[in-house]
Image (cartoon, coloured by chain):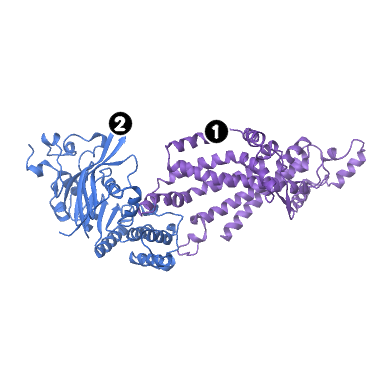
Amino acid sequence: MTETVLDVRNLRVEFPTRRGTLTAVDDISLTIAKGEILGVVGESGAGKSMTGMAILGLLEPPGRIASGEIWLSGDRIDNLSETQMQAVRGRRIGAIFQDPLTSLNPLFRVGDQLVETIRLHTQLSKSAARQRAIELMREVGIPAVEERIDNYPHQFSGGMRQRIVIALALCAEPELIIADEPTTALDVSIQAQITALLKRLCRERGTAVMLVTHDMGVIAETADRVAVMYAGRLAELGAVEDVVRRPQHPYTTGLMGSIPSLRRDEAELQMIPGAMPRLGAIPEGCAFNPRCAFAGPKCRRDTPRIHGNGAACWLALEGATA
Amino acid sequence: MLAFLIKRTANAAFVMLAVALLAFTIFRFFGDPVEMMVNEQATQADRAELRERLGLNDGFVTQYTRFVTNAVQGDFGISYRNQQDVMVLIGDRFPATFELVLVATVISLVVGIPLGVITAVHRDSRLANALQLGSIVGVSLPSFVVGIMLILAFSVTLGWLPAFGRGETVDVGWWSTGLLTPSGRAALVLPAISLSTFQITLVMRLVRAEMLETLRTDYVKFARARGVPAARVQWVHALRNCLMPVITLTGMQIGNLIAFALVTETVFQWPGMGLLFIQAVTFVDIPVMAAYLMLVSFIFVALNTAVDVTYAWVDPRLRDDTAKAGGANG
């Protein structure tokens, strides 16, 4: 296939606490190819944002990468110094955060924030950087750019601000964009616009995208492949059509069942019984086994793992619960 | 912005009228001014005549109006003790206090803000902990103790700097400044440090607390995700968002410093308003006290207004006119 932009190998993120070490991301391996959009889906606390932050090198201490490797287009980036990482962030990896209302510094004009980012990563002069900022703002669909460029963030709506955040992520034409819940804080009508915009811009440029969300609908519309995370582990990985149509992991099946649909006329939405375990209380074996209708003895004993397409479920891996 | 300014100024004027009422009440009704002005041999007729001449028989409102009218023109009457115009007395002393307070404020900001940022960014490091501990000492030491220790160390033991007075001064118009002569500057060092000790720790602790909050915000994280170097994120993006409370504090504290510099002025025999006020209290020199009250209140009110205006300058969200969509030149 095409070249691999992001290659995460056996990533493990740990938080040392007073009551012992918590594993927030447990042995995750995934790759994203050039121009590909990988959706990462899961409940809050499943470790999906944490994976994104680990790739950006922005884990909040005391969180740290305990083991594993992160490769970006053939360069290992998980062991870089803070200074070296500064040259990667923004230039080779762009980021989009959840809440556009708080992502922009309220005291700086949006144009200045764009120009700052552009000049950090390129050799452009101030006026050339401003010209580039205007082009970027136009590209992400801000109307009347010449007037708006000197506005402050509070003078824009939420959707417009997220467009500016996308422009900021694209400043240096990065190879990879990590979009952490980019539409969660927006109105439903705006969500579709922003998702479509992100998809179009990345397709045009061949940018790889890691789209972190808990919204299966966004994934189904946007992503090429999807990684389902549960309790810090990878539950299922595969092409979107496969995972959506023929989920193999009981958890994924449950996730699909919990999406309301206009076509289906069920009286009630299906629900997965129970809740995702806290990080300190992950059961032995498969993390999903207490909530799983099909769990057998092996599920309570051994942890199923995947490092490529497939489902981390003994049922899928061995066809039966031994 | 203009509407905002007008609104603020009207507020300030109203507060000043209230303060004037208070000062006037003290001046007029605490003790009998006539008793304090005449000598013991004065007859009843002399007193009645003086009372009439001073307008003390007029109605309350008339007298208050006269007091305010005079005060606005800078006329607070004659000091009982010095038999000098009160405004001339204060005008002589004000530059000394103002220069002291100004230098102390600059010191507290220049030292306090970086210390606050450092203790927030490197929290739990040994340096930060030492600074935190030091700041507790700074907050708890009374300023006269600091002053006396400074005198002991730098004037008595080392002999580097003068222990009292203002040194030579130069007149620039009616303003007598000590900043332009070497001895004036040398004399300013110890009192300014002594006065700023408390301020430094206050500013430092405030900046630290605000920085800790700001460093957790999304836009700080996002700035780092954009590749902005850590130092720039901390000193430009985060710090600017912390400055609002610092401005408030500094504004309020300048008023405080002017009003309460009298301890430092007493320790260093600094010929400022504080010393004048202490003397006025000793001699029940009510016109001086009333004028001092008015002046200090005026400074407080003026600073408050200036702080509000500065807010609008630092934080674009508070400017009325930029709130309108498309207001491009904020």
Element at label 1: helix
Location of residue A303 in the rendering, given as x and y in whole percent from the top left corner: 15, 38
Where does label 1 land, which residue?
B137
Label 2 near label 1: C-beta < 8 Å? Answer: no
Q: Is residue B8 visible?
A: yes
Is residue B283 rendered to the left or right of residue B258? right
Element at label 2: loop
Classify the position of the C terminus of chain A by image quarter: top left
Is residue B245 rendered to the left or right of residue A9? right
Task: Using the image, name the chain to which the residue with label 2 belongs.
Answer: A
Chain depicted in purple: B
Mark 1 vs mark 2: in front: 1
- Disc 2 marks a residue whose amino acid type is Arg
Location of residue A158 in the rendering, given as x and y in whole percent from the top left corner: 37, 57
Where does label 2 land, which residue?
A19
Visual hue assigned to chain A: blue
Q: Residues within 10 Å of mark 1 (few under 14, many from 20)?
A: some
Is residue B9 rendered to the left or right of residue B219? right
Task: Using the image, name the chain to which the residue with label 1 belongs.
Answer: B
